[in-house]
Image (cartoon, rainbow, N blue to C red):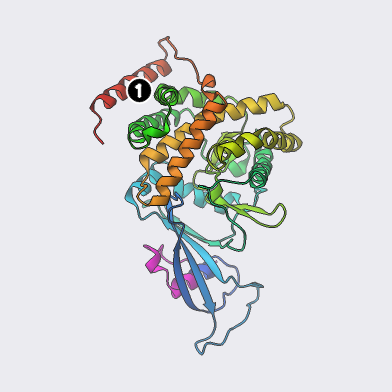
Amino acid sequence: MTAGPAIPGGGNAITVDWIQQALLAGSAVDVPRIRSVEVESIGTGLGLLADLFRCHLTYGDADGESQGDAAGWPRLPESVVVKLPSSELKSRRLCKRFYLYKRECDYYRSLAPNVPLRTPTLLYGDYEPRTDRFVLVLEDLRAMATADQIVGASAEQAKRAIRGIARLHGHYWNKVDQPELSGARRELSPKYRPLVQIVYLSNLLPTLRHFGEVFSAEMRRFAEAYGPRVAEHMGVLAAGPLTFCHGDYRLDNMFFGEGEEFAVIDWQVSAIQSCLYDVAYFLATSVASDIRREVERDALGEYHDIVRTLGAKDLTFEGCWELYRQNIAGRLITAVITCGGLDLNDERSYELAEISLRRTLTAIEDLEAFELIPARRRDLSSATVFSTLSRVGYNLSRAFYRP
């Protein structure tokens, strides 16, 4: 590989020369001459934390004649996808706080070739730790079908997605100390739990202010009671089986091909997590509530069969269902941080956040998942003190909150 070009400052900095240098740096063979590149912004309104551009490529000599396929490039890509940091300052700050850009770059460099779940091929990547700037040049999967998360997955798509993630989860089921996962973030680690609790509580009031009509009276009480217990609930999940998770496993990140062909993009929040995290996240946000009720037991049955075959020998279906319910309750964390902490300026982003929150709250109620939240403790442990201080801080914030 040769040295790569500088990270572009935005879509307007993606030029013919830049693409040529990037593909050359990411390849072990010569890259045919690129004559022109047409840059198209994509992904607007999909709830993304980065900017995406589809680059349409034309190959050929200066006189316009095609060079044909070069050795090592049996099929030249007609287009590639370039991923850059978000143009929204608020989103960039959130990504830096949780190392989201670094995590995705690490995934494509270290893990993607080994995971049993198709992802776009990395053609070139670069990351600057000091600035948290990055670029990924990826295979374009546009030949595969996509679906609209606002509409929701069909029953068949939902089951295919669950089968796909089961293969990933089963591969790493309780094997999270493997060398290839040494750099993966352990999302349920004790050092992260207080931070997640604070971020949840800091975004709860804005969420209730802007999306309050989505909450029933019972779910509003639960959302506020859950805040001081987020860290304890994460501890409960950490005590169960762990695996490597996608982390943002939702319909807008999925591509469907023929038969069982299936691919997933956007690995920014990939991490070691509770084994049913992705399943709960997908079914709670990407499937309309009536479809979820129809398919979730059958889908969980297929998931259970696959992960048992791959190594989760001691997992009963009842245990799998209980883990699912526990993770459903925890999905309120993601919903609140999204609704209260991200820029939702365009119409589709707002609608996507609202419908995902609505579906999540419905799933929590349907499954009575709030029953699984740790009870309020009354000892003098550090966890109890932190929970009490969090509750007092939230109540003070509520008294003085101004949108």
Q: Which residue is mark 1?
A: 390
Identify the residue at the far bottom of this view.
63
Residue 51 vs residue 288, the one in the foreground: 288
Q: Is 239 above or below relative to 182?
A: above
| Residue 95 colored in magenta in the image | no
Q: Position of residue 147 (x, y in %)?
A: 57, 53
Residue 298 seen in render:
yes
Percent x, y for residue 387? 39, 19
Binning the other alpha carbons within 10 Å of mark 1 as few (below 14), some (14 to 19) or many (20 upward) gives some
Q: Quadrant of residue 392?
A: top left
Q: Which residues are magenta?
A: 1-21
Q: Quadrant of the N terminus?
A: bottom right
> Could you tell me which residue is drawn at 39 percent across and 54 percent down?
86
Q: Is residue 224 left or right of residue 156?
A: left
Which kind of residue does numbered mark 1 sit on? Ser
Pick the quarter of the image with the C terminus.
Answer: top left
Residue 29 placement: quadrant: bottom right
Q: Nearer the viewer, residue 214 or 166?
A: 214
